[in-house]
Amino acid sequence: MSAITSPASTRAEAGSRSYSWLYWLWILALTAVFGVGIATGIYVLQNGLGVTNLTDELPWGLWITVDLSAIALGAGAFTMSAAVYLFGLKHYEAVARAAVLVGFLGYTSAMMALFLDIGRPDRFYHPLIYWNVHSVLWEITLCVVLYATVLVIELLPIVIESTFLKRFGWLVKLAHGIHRLMPVVALLGLGLSLLHQSSLGATYGILTARPVWFSPTAPVLFILSAIAAGASLTLFVTLFASMVTRKQLVPPQILRGVAYFIAAAVLGYLYLKLWSWAATNYYSEIPEQQLGLEILAVNTPYNYTFWFGEVLFGAFIPAVILLWGRLRRNPRAVMVACFMIIVGLVINRWNMTLSGFVVPLDWLPGEASLPPNTYAPNLIEYLVSAGIVAYSWLVYSLAVRFINLYPDERPLQPGEDVQML
Amino acid sequence: MTDQTPNTNQDNAQPNAAQQQEIQESNTRLLGRRDFMTLLIGGGTSFVLATTLAQPLETLLTPFMQQRVNSGHGHGNEESPYRWGMVIDLSKCVGCDYCVYACQATNNVEDGMRWNIREDDVTQTGNVYHVTRPCLHCNNAPCVTVCPTVATYQRPDGLVVMDYDKCIGCRYCQTACPYGARSFNWDSRDEGAAAPHSPEFGRAEVDTRPRGVVEKCTFCVHRIDAGLEKGLMPGVNAEATPACVNICPTTARYFGNLKDPNSTVSRLIRENPTLRLREDLGTDPNVYYIPAEGMVV
């Protein structure tokens, strides 16, 4: 926020001069982390997944969490596109472009994580040619690939009209053509997103052998949390960039609309989450699930991360901030709320992934039970994940600088703060 | 920004903020009466259309779907005279691990990736006994359902097997299997090395699997297929029978055709109380256990 140290007079001048050396330092740092991530990724490709801390008993870990979180945080793209092109809320184009970029970065990040996380990256296209229509993961793969294409189509006109590409007449014509097709593209995006964002929850929810996972609410909880967190990330980066660049990037009433939208989605998520818990843990008891939750409580901080990380700080308090007028008018409070929702979502995806694996399978016919499974990511897994996060921040930072990402932006007056309504 | 696009009104910073806000608020209103009626009629029409079209569409699409899904869920489309199954007598098992080692030697399986394992279990009355667990070759195999590439599938004769050339190594089958019966090749195998526990417990009869794919017990499918071609009967002739069954010193394991009422396995299931692991999950395994002393069935 204090990245701009130059005096107000130079600040007011539009153009590249308002980007200080701190900006380039930031870009350099991100590039370095991304580079380390790529180098580590190549090491993983050469040596196989044996270099991770994953095991046969706990085969999915940090990278799956990154992948699930990135896809969920990219969900702002489909909701905002649908708002603008399907529900006629044209003014939301002020933030929809940024949402589409965030979505694109989320999905490409997820694809990078998945590419490394499968044992045979050279066969990544196999689900496209060997169909198993009964597999929820097959459906997800197809939807993610198609939706990534939708995001590229949505992003293309923005990139063309604000870079050197606009010198090519046929490209500009293409951009106009795409723009006219936008309602269709947005409808496709909406359908595909509703499908796979939910199916990601179903990935865990359908597994009858894992009592902690098995739940019909998992798909709905996944999509509701994704809708809330996706818009949160878009709002967070928009406000952050507004403060750093000293611009009102998006008009305040649009920001308020997004904040209300997030609050509504969070409340819906919270409602279903609490009832999902109450119906299966409080008003009734499934012995296997109870035992699983006890094992989790003893072996992991699951109870605390669930109630504090996911419910209280990840959903309830942010919803209060976004709905309480005095707090919502403060852009910093809104940023805190968005950040809490984002962190809450990542904790949720981590808990979802780990909980079902930590509780051991119960196939022995007698009284004995297998030991609980443990997992902690190692340095290689962390470095790759950091590289993927750095990639998305890097591209976003460059886009704010070089692409007309916020069509309704205006510079802030000296001493003026970013406005929220 | 770098480009002076026409829609960025940088000069007139705040023109009539209140007025602009009002206009935008009216533009951002969600649902008018007209929109509501449109939605209602549109929704109703779609519903009627969907319900009338569902049946013809299904008959139209089903052949196409079946063509794409070459193995699909559950039993294969073709009929087979065989359904291979195993009976494991827990009251006879002494926990010597011979079946574990024979499997490793025959199928070239490393210690950390055992297809066939032994666990110690205890009855409600405190009687300790041993459970050995191959892949149960479920008729409703969760691993087959979840595989995104049909790399694992069930043959018409009931065997759940892997196509190592299709597997992408996503490990969803490991996640879905209720019995932990699947191993992933985390590291590359040394192809020249002798199989574990060979030659004492047998010699490798199949190739090692490449890094990055999942593998599992096959009921020694290579022996079954080769044996049938020679006119041998799996479960009767040792050459056509899984290695773990042949080596068992207490004959706690039996193998055979569950579709043949006169096979040993069918007879044992008829004459003894049996249990299958996690029958509550509806996986319908083809491995039956005769309970140990003191077990409640």
Image: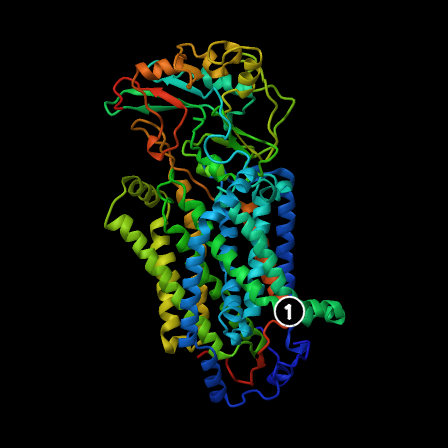
Q: Chain of mark 1?
A: A
Q: Given the current orientation, which residue lies at the most extreme right position? A: A168
Q: Residue at x 50, y 36 (%)?
A: B72
Within 10 Å of disc 1 (Cα), the crowding (few <14, some 14-19, many 20+) is some
How far from the left and from the top, in percent, is residue B203?
A: 58, 15
The quarter of the picture where residue B222 lies is top right
Q: Is residue A198 above or below residue B295?
A: below
Q: Residue at x 38, y 35 (%)?
A: A361
Horizontally, residue A201 falls left or right of residue A153, namely left
Q: Is residue B69 above or below residue B50?
A: above
Q: Which residue bears the numbered disc 1?
A: A158
Q: Given the current orientation, which residue lies at the most extreme bottom position? A: B16
Helix, strand or loop at label 1? It is helix
Depth order, front residue of A274/B186: A274
How far from the left and from the top, in percent, is residue A19?
A: 64, 74
The quarter of the picture where residue A380 lies is top right
Q: Is residue A322 visible?
A: yes
Q: Is residue B109 above or below residue A64?
A: above
The quarter of the picture where residue B87 lies is top left
How far from the left and from the top, in percent, is residue A276?
A: 32, 53
Q: Is residue B252 visible?
A: no
Horizontally, residue B258 falls left or right of residue B216, namely left
Residue type, mark 1 in image: Ile
Q: Residue at x 50, y 10 (%)?
A: B238
How far from the left and from the top, in percent, is residue B110?
A: 54, 25
Q: Which corner quadrant holds the C terminus of chain A?
A: bottom left
